[in-house]
Image (spheres, rainbow, N blue to C red):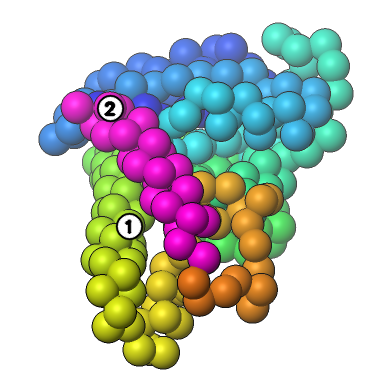
Amino acid sequence: MYKLLFIDEEKETLEDFEDFVENFPAKIELQAITQLPLADKEEMIDYIIKLAPDALISDFRLNEMKTDIDYNVPYNGVDLVEEFESIRNHFPCFVLTALDDEAVNQSDDVNIVYVKNILYKKDEGEGKAKAQFLDRVISQIEHYQKRIQNSKNELTELVKVREAGEADIEIENRIIFLDDFLEKSIDARNSIPSEFKTLSNATRLDNILNKVDTLLNKLGDNAK
């Protein structure tokens, strides 16, 4: 099962998203998790990490409708997903909006923006757009998890080569590259710049591999 977290300031729209996901015939079971935006972006980020979704989907304007919240939300969906991606690199993130031009102009990645009408339209063209959106979400989840797993497996094998005393400079540089990628996939806030990493820090590599195992176990539990 893949958990899709959707954030919007209207409870009715959150319910619409739950119906949208529930009625989509996917090869793998999907679970919609919905959440009103918190007033503080950092608290929102921490809460997302705690929920451990497989993908993050947010409305663009999170402070527009005041029907279900009585506080100010000083960030929009693009701000939120870009902040989250800066912490967990390459994580599957998307923005749904009725204002696609504005959202595209504010986003560094135009591919994350989708028109919100796909939640409601029933004609053939919109049905295709709906399928394309959720298929893309699933594809991004699978690509993200596979890349982490493959990088972890490669790093494990290269560490064995190093421990056998057979690593050359090319292998050592590859170890640093994979270490850097995996560390930023876990939490880029605490990552060490690659230029400051030594070639022989075996203890730190073990810690990274353990953290990757923990992350993959959480994601693996979702996919079962």
- Please tell me which residue lies in front, 60 or 222: 222
Can you say whether 21 is above or below 160 in the image? above
Residue 217 seen in the figure:
yes
Residue sitting at x 58%, y 48%: 187
Answer whether residue 214 is magenta in the image: yes
Q: Give me the disc on residue 12.
A: none
The residue that disc 1 covers is: 152
- The residues tagged by marks 2 and 1 sit, at their Cα atoms, a distance apart of 18 Å
Q: Is residue 198 left or right of residue 207?
A: right
Q: Main secondary structure of the magenta part?
A: helix
Tell me where the magenta segment starts and ends, as one range: 201-224
Q: Element at badge 1?
A: helix
The residue that disc 2 covers is: 221
Question: What amino acid does circle 2 point to?
Answer: Asp
Residue sitting at x 75%, y 12%: 69
Say few, some or many: other residues with alpha carbon within 10 Å of mark 2 (under 14 / 14 to 19 / 20 or more).
few
Q: Which residue sits furthest left?
A: 27
Q: Position of residue 64 (x, y in %)?
A: 76, 28
> Total number of numbered labels?
2
Can you say whether 16 is above or below 157 in the image? above
Residue sitting at x 63%, y 57%: 191
Can you say whether 152 is above or below 75 in the image? below
Q: Element at badge 2?
A: helix
